[in-house]
Amino acid sequence: MPQPLPTGPRSGRSFATPCRRRRPTPIRSTCHQSRRWALWLEEPPGHCVVACDGARVLGSAKMGPNRPAAGAHIGTASFMVDSNARGAGIGRQLADFVIAWHRERGYLGIQFNAVVETNSSAVHLWQDRGFEIIGTVPGAFRSPTHGDVGLHIMFLDLRQE
């Protein structure tokens, strides 16, 4: 099960492998290690967890309110899974943790603002967990392999069981 993230870059955990993944990532692999942590960690009320095998980081999720103030009742999250750990259920474990975390804190829903439409495993995972595609921004993501592709906005209504 995912664990709370230890304190930042001095924890000894590396972002190198998750950031060299084959699928698009919002954090550039050329970004300095300490900057990666700064971009990834969430301030309260947000939260960040890692899934590990010993000292090896298999994946990570960060979660919290989608927007401040009047939008804080809807949550959001971002995920990274090590390319060498794909297919082992790490993303599913992180997904289940994130959904439970939002439910336990009384969020009314979870909104993902940018799921790359060509990332079929992520789209399938979220649909399997009850998320719906509520819109797609055409050509909003520059994929190095597919060119300009759409970004799905996905939503899970937590008021429904």
Image (cartoon, grey):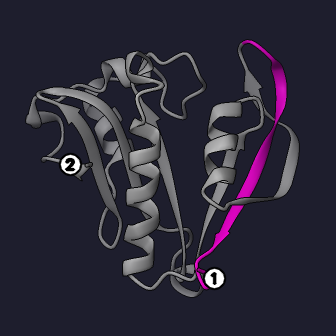
Query: What is the chief secondary structure element of the magenta stretch?
Result: strand
**Magenta-span inclusion, residue 97:** no
**What's the amino acid at mark 1?**
Gln
* Callout 1 secondary element: loop
> Residue 92: where, in percent of width, then height?
46, 45
**Which segment is the magenta one?**
145-161
Q: What x and y, as percent, mark residue 73?
A: 54, 83
Q: Residue at x 44, y 77 (%)?
A: 103
Name the amino acid, label 2.
Leu
Residue drawn at x 45%, y 40% as measured from the top left:
91
The numbered mark, 2 or 1, whose residue comes first in the sequence reads: 2
Q: Which residue is mark 2?
A: 5
Say whether residue 25 is left or right of residue 146: left
Residue neighbourhood size for the residue with mark 1, other residues' Cα within 10 Å, grouped as few (<14), some (14–19), many (≥20): few
Q: Which residue corresponds to mark 1?
A: 160
In the structure shown, which secondary structural element does the residue marked by tag 2 occupy? loop
